[in-house]
Image (cartoon, rainbow, N blue to C red):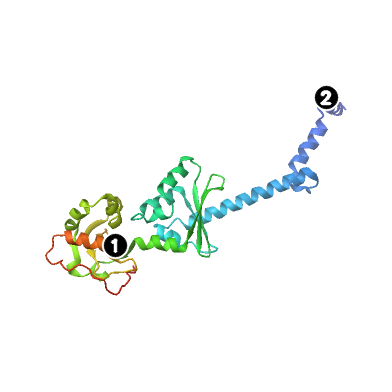
Amino acid sequence: MVILSAFIILEFYANLFEKSVGHYLKWQNHKRPQLGRMWERDRQSLIAQAQIQSIRSSLDIQEENASGISSLKQLFENVSPGFPLVVTREKFLHLYFDFPGLGSEQIISPYDLINLDSGNNWEQVFLKRFGPWVTLQFLGPQNIPVHEIFLSIDTISEVHATRSIKRGTLEESDFKQNRIFRIDEVLPVLKSLDSVTQKAVFPEPRWFLEKNYHISRVGIADIVTGEEQHLVFGIEYDTDYYTGVLFIPVALELANNIMSQIDRSDVLGLAAVQPSFEVIP
């Protein structure tokens, strides 16, 4: 009797029964049929959260797939219809500035990158391909594009053509012995060129230094390639594990000018236009 009286008093002053029922309904809410405007709003909220989580999971998987990519060329080669890729801001900038030459500027200007970065609002780059086009979307914190670039496959191929790499020696890439020079024979000529011309025929030295690549020789092909009349320069370097050659197409007139300044008595016959071939690493 005393307990019943105490319960009635608590119910009268504290609405204990109503609060208990309310808490019970709240705890069991996710198990009950969702009816009415309030339940429909909650259901839509849960669906939206699930969709956002699905998008984030998909982007995480695409980013994981791109984690092993080590060059800008490999990045674009791995993008195919139906298989997009995501790289972090840090990864994209590393690949962009790691390209041995100015070809990456055909993708996006470094000044545009500075302008984009000034807002401090991009964290990833999403790459997808549709037919002959590749789209680059710079994503913000909420995975919303803050900048977008459309590149044709032809443009990407042109970027790749400006620099290519092959393992092996200059001789193994068909460079003639009398057109292969020690690096100390070529450097004085390179140092005498203006900065724009230097970048056209030679990558930034830091590209070799940071990778611990030791340049040993430079070769100049004896056959003109391409419709625009280029000679291929081959820069041979040694790593801890192998020897490699970086190929750079150089305008014929500039290549002949460089060769004419190299003090070698056995290099007198400059390049003549011959049937072209293409160096394919």
- Which of marks 2 and 1 precedes in the sequence? 2
Kindly identify which residue carries mark 1.
251
Position in image of residue 86 (x %, y %): 50, 54
Can residue 168 be seen here?
A: yes
Position in image of residue 204 (x %, y %): 29, 52
Amino acid type, residue under disc 1 in the picture:
Ala
Q: Is residue 148 left or right of residue 24?
A: left
Q: Quadrant for the C terminus, please.
A: bottom left
Can residue 217 be seen here?
A: no
Amino acid type, residue under disc 2 in the picture:
Tyr
Q: Residue at x 11, y 65 (%)?
A: 265
Gap between marks 1 and 2 measured at Cα: 94 Å
Kindly identify which residue carries mark 2.
13
Q: Residue at x 46, y 63 (%)?
A: 153
Q: Residues within 10 Å of mark 1 (few under 14, many from 20)?
A: some
Q: Residue at x 20, y 51 (%)?
A: 192
Q: Nearer the viewer, residue 97 or 113?
A: 113
Q: Is residue 73 left or right of residue 174?
A: right
Q: Nearer the viewer, residue 275 or 159?
A: 275
